[in-house]
Amino acid sequence: MTLTGNWTYPTAIRFGAGRLKELPETCAEAGMARPLLVTDRGLADLPITAAALDILEAAGLGRGLFAEVDPNPNERNLAAGVEAFRAGGHDGVIAFGGGSGLDLGKMVAFMSGQTRPVWDFEDIGDWWTRADAEAIAPIVAVPTTAGTGSEVGRASVITNSETHEKKIIFHPRVLPRVVLCDPELTVGMPRAITAGTGLDAFAHCVEAFSSPHYHPMSQGIALEGMRLVKEYLPRAYADGTDLEARAHMMSAAMMGSTAFQKGLGAIHALSHPIGAVFNAHHGTTNAVCMPAVLAFNAEAIRERFDSAAAYLGIEGGFEGFQAFVQDLNDRMGIPRTLAELGATPERIDELAEMAIQDPSCGGNPVALTVEDLRTLFHRCM
């Protein structure tokens, strides 16, 4: 099977090994002549970033770079990025990297022409209509991990550095115009990042599949996304140069993000405040929280996961799926507790109050209360 294609769901996607060289054509397709490449500090000096900048420069597109991006990007990073965008006379953004680089890059393009503060566009009701849609710069997304799926998303997660709350900022035009997925860019990912990002994709699929909302297309995508993670994440983890496994994991990441249009749930409601307060890696935090949330939601999701387990080749129905999840975490070196990620139990009351405000709660198959979330945090600690 040839792992390549040109897809338009949910947006135009150029997928295949070695396609980074198509970056100039991708920029032209998006209408950019002077792009700003936005990535995180960890990627700024790596060979894959230098290669992307060399390709842009050789094509006469300059080598504009902004890399002042934290692992959990915040409004200060955003303000600096917008300033760099305007000062450099850029006309579009290449969002390059993992979730942090992709999310902040998308927001730099979004905020480059706005006059209101970013918090005015939080994903609440129709707040997105407050934005000047015509002032949003075009975006090309180039993922270098296989996890968040932010490259095919219409939102970004930005941490408020004052309140330590993660906020989802949404606008339909934040969806990148073109996505360039080159699995070769993920070959150098460390094993811990391969595991954490891969399990983030898995969590997206699990929560979308669990969500009570009606969206058969997302349901099917989530199911196949889970299968790809089950089959190929252990291979990518064992051998980072396994290009077939890396390619399938890039697909699974996009599938997870596409599927969670149907909804997320308690895993993300728990994970967002932990990441904001303790700066823990998002995908790893999701993985730690997943077993407790599956147990909490058991009666509401048992029947559908009995079917999913059969499709995935897991014996024992829902209980077999639960056992598989814990075994996969263990095989990937994921801690069993949030305490091992630096979280402390004395802040559980505060975390539970933050979690109940998270929009992910709305997609959980069991209605959540502050007391439920407090209990779940205790179990995960």
Image (spheres, rainbow, N blue to C red):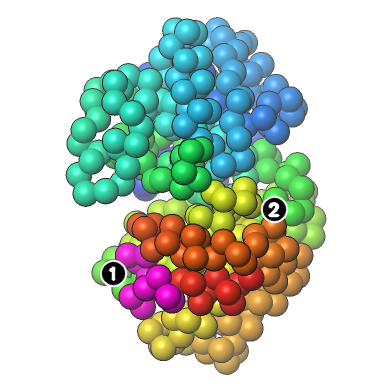
- Along the line of sight, which residue is nearer the eye, 184 or 270? 270
Q: Residue at x 66, y 77 (%)?
A: 326
Using the image, tell me which numbered label, if any, was put on residue 194: 2
Q: Is residue 351 left or right of residue 331?
A: left
Is residue 363 inside the magenta stretch?
A: yes
Which residue is nearer to you in this view: 257 or 377? 377
Q: Secondary structure at mark 1?
A: loop
Name the quadrant of the N terminus: bottom right
Residue 164 visible in the current orientation: yes
Give the residue type at disc 2: Thr
Residue type beneath disc 1 = His
Residue reaching furthest to the bottom: 316
**Residue sitting at x 42%, y 62%:** 353
Under tag 2, what secondary structure? helix
Q: Of callouts 1 and 2, which one flags the residue occurring earlier in the amino acid sequence? A: 2
Disc 1 from disc 2: Cα separation: 30 Å
Range drawn in magenta = 360-372
Q: Residue 46 at x, y = what percent?
A: 74, 29
Which residue is at the front of the view, 239 or 38?
38
Residue 188, how many percent across, how many down? 75, 42
Spot occupied by residue 339 in the image (x, y as percentages of width and height): 69, 65
Residue 177 location, quadrant: top left
Q: Quadrant of the C terminus?
A: bottom right
Q: Which mark is residue 213?
A: 1
Task: Decide if residue 279 is on the left or right side of residue 155.
Answer: right
Where in the figure is residue 346, as x and y percent of width and height?
A: 60, 64
Residue 286 vs 120, above or below: the answer is below
